[in-house]
Every structure is written in structure tokens, then in C-alpha cells.
Amino acid sequence: MYYKNLYRKEMIKNFIIIGIILFVAVFSTYHIYYAFSNTEEIDYSSTSLDITFHEETGEELDITKITPLTDSVGLSSKGHSITITNNLTEEVNYKIKIVDNEKKMQEQNCVGITIPREEIRVSIKQSGEETEVYKLSDLEDGVILSTRAKALEEEKYTIRIWVNNETSLPSGSKHHYHGLIQVVENDTTVAVR
């Protein structure tokens, strides 16, 4: 009789422990899955294009500290990924632009401490294509890419921005730059706040 009660207590204890372990495992798996699947994406849509930014900062490009880099190091730095999808069964013209983030510059009172555009390098990499590198000051109206999307085509781009290693600004200085990635379809801005 004594062993029967001891056996029953041991079984109940084991069921409770297994239940707690299963609950913790399911709860943890659920939260881990949604933590990775719900990364913040900022989406814009028009009748023909869907634009998805894959970074938490969305379309914002920021340099908050002067760290001069060579082009090879700048090209290996973290980029801003963007996907543009043509939803139409016909071709669509669009441009990708880099423009100053005037609102953020006013909020942070950047007068006199903005990195000169001549010292900022920017690159764009289209999947399956060569990476193009430019000085920000050389871009006409900030246009880094002007292209045409085929019917129902999806294109992925990676944009990187860094300070040229030949900068006259001292490393670690408080100069900074705030920019935005804009997608312009047929002279109508699609992706912009």
C-alpha cells in the first residue's frame, strides 16, 4: 500500500514537471518565432509598385560618427536592403534617389555639423549585377539608379553609405549625415515619409 501511494505521488509529480516543461517549450518557441518573423518592415505601395525596406530604420540612411573607410571596406559594411516589386503586367519606370532627411536635420539641429556631400560615398548593388559606387555630390538630383521593371518582376537592392577615407574631417568627430532612400515612379514619389 505504501509503495502504491509513493508510486502515484511520483507519477503525479512527473506529469506536472513534464507539463511545465512542455508549456515553457511551446511558449518560448512561439515568442522566438514571432520575434524573428515580425521584424519591422516599412512598406509603401502604389498601383504598380510595392516597396519593402528590410531594416528597422526603413528608408533612413544615417552616419552618426566619422569613421573614414576605403571603398573596399565600405562595400563590406552593413547595407540597407530594399525590394521593389512590379504588380502590373506591363513595364514600369522608376528611380531610386538618396535625398537629405530635412526633418531629422531640423530636429537634431545639424547646422554646421553636417558631413559634406563630397566626402560621402554611396553604393547600390542590384541582385546579379555589379556594385556601383558614387560620391553623393555627383548624383544628379540624388538619383542613384534609373531603371525599368519588367512585368511582375521583383528586384532586390542593397544600398550602403560611408565616409570616404580621404575626408578632411577628424575620425570620431560629431559631424553626421541624415538621408532618405526614395523610390520615384514616373516622377511621383512612392516611398517617402
Image (cartoon, rainbow, N blue to C red):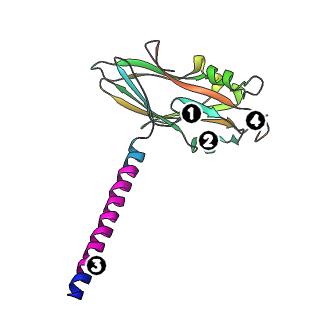
Q: Earlier in the sequence, mark 2 or mark 1?
A: 2
Residue type highlighted by circle 2: Gly
Residue type highlighted by circle 1: Ser
The residue furthest top is 187
Give the Cα distance between marks 2 and 3. 62 Å
Q: Toward the viewer: 2 or 171?
A: 2
In the image, the segment drawn in magenta is 7-32
Tell me residue 77's x, y (percent).
Answer: 58, 44
The residue located at (30%, 73%) in the rendering is: 13
Q: Quadrant of residue 127?
A: top left
- Taking 50 as reference, is 80 above or below it? below
Q: Earlier in the sequence, mark 3 or mark 1?
A: 3
Disc 2, disc 1: CB below 8 Å?
yes
- The local crowd at label 1, few if under 14, some if 14 to 19, many if 20 or more residues have their Cα within 10 Å, is many
The residue furthest front is 1
Give the Cα distance between marks 2 and 1. 9 Å
Q: Is residue 57 left or right of residue 35?
A: right
